[in-house]
Amino acid sequence: MNMQFDMAQNAALPTMVRPCVGHNCERCDVRDRAICADLSASDRDALSRIGRRVSLKAGQTVMWEGDDNMVVANVVEGTLKLATSTGDGREQIVGVVYASDFIGRPFGARTPHSVTALTDARLCLFPRGAFDGFARDHAELQHRLLQRTLDDLDRTRAWMLLLGRKTAREKVATFLLDMGRRLRADRDGVIDLPLSRQQIADILGITIETVSRQMTELKRGGTIDLIGRRGVRLVDMAELEALAEAG
Amino acid sequence: MNMQFDMAQNAALPTMVRPCVGHNCERCDVRDRAICADLSASDRDALSRIGRRVSLKAGQTVMWEGDDNMVVANVVEGTLKLATSTGDGREQIVGVVYASDFIGRPFGARTPHSVTALTDARLCLFPRGAFDGFARDHAELQHRLLQRTLDDLDRTRAWMLLLGRKTAREKVATFLLDMGRRLRADRDGVIDLPLSRQQIADILGITIETVSRQMTELKRGGTIDLIGRRGVRLVDMAELEALAEAG
DNA sequence: GACGCCCTTTGACAGAGGTCAATGCATGGG
DNA sequence: CCCATGCATTGACCTCTGTCAAAGGGCGTC
């Protein structure tokens, strides 16, 4: 592989983002769930040549709120957060994305929120201009993107009900149910949360102390079990569902 | 005018929704802002034949949360709210739509939130199945829909920051600025809010009493003026902007 | 295997906003 | 033009959640 070529590509990327090598769409983990799923083999190849794979370490930020919007990407592996914040530093996480999800803002000049890796992650990254051009010529891609964006909007609006109208107890219960649905539990029924208490607080619009207190009370009531910092076992799902809707 | 034809159309519609007659896309108020703007004259005619115009009275609900998703529509005139609620009746308004906006959930079987007219309104209404089919064959339409949905998502996510992290004072100030941007003031600089205090509360995720108290304090501070129930004059925009970001 | 860091938990207290209740006052109908 | 109705305002009080501070305990490192 050509060293100079690699370094030239790196120059346009945020610090520490490292391109991967030896990519092949046919073997891609998310090939039939990502937005490229409906493309023909040749179209997918063409799209693939526009972009490239990059690896991220947990904690790295790929895009910053308000920045010029240079790239979009498919998430191949890992979990990332989308966040906005007020001038004085209060943060609200506005979305969490998983493998096969799409990130970035196509057809727009500004990035409306930051994107930060919560776990180590791999992306399939495209320069926005090139991606936009490709998308305009491929209706299947735009259709997939539209479906995905409509789903995102539905989920985001459902989350507004949580932020605006639910109590801390209901918020935490709803969050745990949501994670239970998204993440696979291990053989002991334990889920490994990809988020710290602070990040959970930033998702739910409450403080870290309130998250902690609610979790402890749920544990005391026998509804959940806490295993270390990141582990949770959802013991009584029915109870959790009841608490998620009415305190 | 054919009476029987009209009544047959009415049968498929929510109670009290009355079809209009004499429609012509060429004279449509929103023709160059709605999603149909990029269609050729003949395509627009074809789309027009799929749908029809209906009038709504303030307070009428067009779609209910969780219902089978039968229709989508362009808003021709008026203001409507999108809302979800918890089992025990707490409501959160998740969006407010204006003339030229699009409502309903294309490509999905369920309506994720209710849609209710805040003012008298006129819609250009399409059966969802027929609209979906038409959209699949018209990339320009899907592109417009995608752009609009991406914008909606950006705005919705910005609103999450308000719901999760802003104080009552900041929420009310942000709301007033937003209305000031959207609605044209009359010659006295007075805006006529299309929302009751309760609805404002449901948008901001606070109670009606808190909205009222904040408004009164803003008035006492000389930042705004209150004229009757629905009138507001934004006196000190700079102050309002400062309050919107940091209490 | 022990140590130290930092995340998390717990406690005490305060305050923003919710709740309940009464009064005020636009607005539309008679 | 006046009255009645329902929305909006105001007040008193209380609770939930935030704030500040300290102690506890995983987890990575040496």
Image (tube, coloured by chain):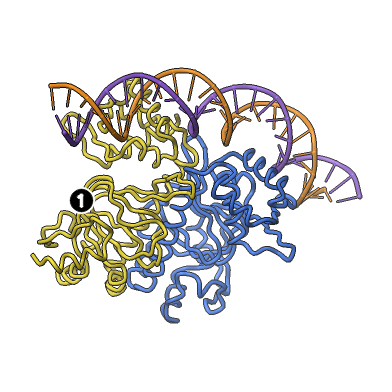
Chain colours: A blue, B yellow, C purple, D orange
Q: Position of residue A222 (x, y in %)?
A: 72, 50
Q: Residue at x 49, y 41 (%)?
A: B164
Q: Position of residue A13 (x, y in %)?
A: 50, 57
Query: What residue do we see at 25% from left, 46% from top?
Result: B58
Q: Secondary structure beneath disc 1?
A: strand
Q: Position of residue A94 (x, y in %)?
A: 49, 50
Q: From the viewer's perspective, is residue B153 above or below residue B167?
A: below
Q: From this view, report whether residue A237 is shown above or below residue B117.
A: below
Which quadrant is home to the N terminus of chain A? bottom right
Q: Residue at x 65, y 55 (%)?
A: A193
Location of residue B33 by image quarter: bottom left
Q: Is residue B232 above or below residue B28?
A: above
Relative to residue A133, is residue A151 drawn left or right?
Answer: right
Residue B191 appears in the picture as rendered? yes
Q: Which residue is mark 1?
A: B77
Q: The C terminus of chain A is located in which quarter?
A: top right
Q: Is residue B232 in view from this perspective?
A: no
Which residue is nearer to you in this view: A33 or C4? Answer: A33
Identity of the amino acid at label 1? Glu
